[in-house]
Image: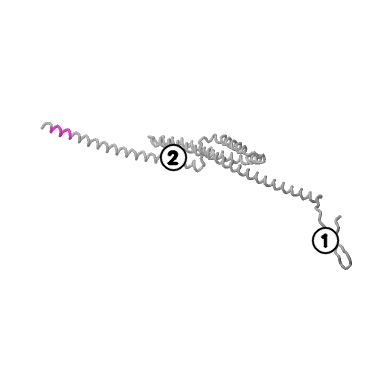
Amino acid sequence: MPRIPTVRNQAGFAPLNLPRPRRFDIGGGAFRALEGFGENLGRIADRLQDSQDDHEFEKAGRTYNAEADAVLLGLKQDPNYLDHPATGLKQLKDAQKRITGSTQNPRVKERLNRFYETTEPGLLFKINSQALGIGVVQQKASLFQIREELVDEAAKAETEEEIKEKAAEYSALVEKDAERGILNALEAQKEKAGFLNRVDQVRDELRKEARIEENQRIKREKEEAVEARNQSNTEFYRKLQDNN
């Protein structure tokens, strides 16, 4: 044991009260502190991993949404609307497989699969709705083309009975398309009522074209007559000169 320093005073020698050196406690308290520090590090690591998972999932989700928009746009430009549901579903599945395969993180893969299951029905609904819209536009265009053909035939008809037959034929087509939902009630009524007006317009156009053609024919005949007369006069004067 080291000796305790002493100092001399009037009463004699007395111990000097110096602070004793503190011993480091390496007992349970220190180990508990180290254990708590390790738990904090673990929680921080988990949070970092969660943040990394969130960012990777967000990036993959954005890529999938962009590819889904591209699928819709591509189908919109495809006139074969009846094939759109099957084609669109296949393209979405291919995009899902490609994007999921681009990550090695099982947690992100699981979140992506749940994301696909949640969003796929809505995307298929958009694809089907878009296909129906394209189909309606195409069917309307086809109906209007038939209308113009029937109008042209009615405008060239020689009797009113033939015109009425063409109008009745078109009205039947309009009613069928209205029953199928291609035309609404207002559109159907407008189409049936406007058929005869369209016939009158075409007949006026045909009469106008006929007048123009007739005027051109008369003008052409006059020009030909003048040219023939000039040629005749030229021949006459040539013969006179030859005789002289």
Residue 42: x and y in percent read 72, 46
Residue at x-position 17% and y-position 33%: 235
Few, some or many residues within 10 Å of mark 2 (<14, 14–19, 20+): many
Residue sitting nearer the eye, 221 or 116: 116
- Image quadrant where residue 3 sits: bottom right
Residue 37: x and y in percent read 74, 49
244 left or right of 39 in image: left
Q: Which residue is mark 1?
A: 18
- The first of marks 1 and 2 along the sequence is 1
The verdict on residue 238 being magenta is yes
Q: Which residues lie in the magenta part? A: 234-241
Q: Main secondary structure of the magenta part?
A: helix
Residue 194: x and y in percent read 44, 41
Element assignment for label 1:
loop
Q: Amino acid at mark 1?
A: Leu
Q: Residue 195's mark? A: 2
Colour style of the rendered protein structure: one colour
